[in-house]
Image: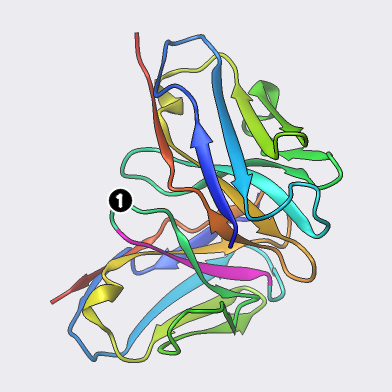
Amino acid sequence: DIQMTQSPSSLSASVRDRVTITCRASQSISNYLNWYQQKPGRAPNLLIYAASSLQSGVPSRFSGSGSGTDFTLTISSLQPEDLATYYCQQSYRTPYTFGQGTKLEIK
Amino acid sequence: QVQLQESGPGLVKPSQTLSLTCTISGGSITSGGYHWSWIRQPPGKGLEWIGYISFSGSTYYNPSLESRITISADTSKNQFSLKLSSVTAADTAVYYCARVSSSNWVFFDYWSQGTRVTVSS
């Protein structure tokens, strides 16, 4: 299985801060990397697919980058509604696997 | 707008079979370019992909669960189902069904709200 490792596991930031979450794959996955946002008590929601493509309806403050084994999710200006846990997920090969999650708190 | 809704018991006894059904509205289970998947999340933990059934009826399972899983589809009802046998407390989780978009890139673009299943006697 391809292992996905996110860092940090948790972070606290202020409104309007720039936030970066990283995800590393245990082997090259090209651009087959997706990012999801899960708000408390809710199902995950797709933010970014193919490493850098913004899903329809997702605010433009979210962006993704990277290829191969190293990827980044960036929130350019943190908003209160961005309180959530963020997961990366590889779709290069089954079994599809997720990172352990990054819990984002608002200061 | 695709919507997914699970149904099934919220409590299952150890060693029994967990059975869930996902009903699709706003889309067809036989639409090309999509698979239909199950994903679970144990309490306070991360996400685990269980498996999927393709629009053509082929199935792909997570090897960690493969010996206990069956995913099937009822095209007449626009539903797909999960059966997980010989459950233990480790199978307690919120179970989601999701659509897998697989035309060029592969991602989970629509999710159900999730149903909590507890394994306990």
Q: Which residues are magenta?
A: A32-39
Which residue is painted at 48% across and 58% down in the image? A99
Chain ID at mark 1: A
Judging from the image, the colouring scheme is rainbow
Is any part of residue B105 visible from this angle?
Answer: yes
| For residue A34, side relative to residue B13 (left or right) | right
User: Which residue is labeled 1 in the image?
Assistant: A41
For label 1, the crowd category at 10 Å Cα-Cα, with few meaning under 14, some 14 to 19 and many 20 or more, is few
Viewer-side residue, A96 vs B75: B75
Q: Is residue A34 above or below residue B37?
A: below
A83 in magenta: no
User: Label 1 amino acid?
Assistant: Gly
Residue B80 at x, y = what percent?
67, 35
State the SS at label 1: loop
Q: Nearer the viewer, residue A64 or B12?
A: B12
Coordinates of residue B77 in the picture (x, y in percent) = 70, 34
Residue displayed at 75% across by 56% down: B34
The answer to if A38 sits in the magenta stretch is yes
Q: Residue at x 58, y 69 (%)?
A: A34
Report which quarter residue B27 is drawn in. Answer: bottom right
Q: Is residue A60 above or below residue B51?
A: below
Residue A52 drawn at (x, y percent):
59, 83
Q: Which residue sits at x=31%, y=65%?
A: A84
* Residue A106, x across and y down, in percent: 18, 75
Q: Main secondary structure of the magenta part?
A: strand
Picture quadrant of residue B42: top left
Is there any visible trace of residue A94 in the rendered image?
Answer: no
Nearest the camera: A24 or A54?
A54
Q: Residue furthest right?
A: B56
Question: Relative to residue B54, is residue B32 depicted above or below?
Answer: below
In the image as oriented, which residue stretches furthest toward the left? A107
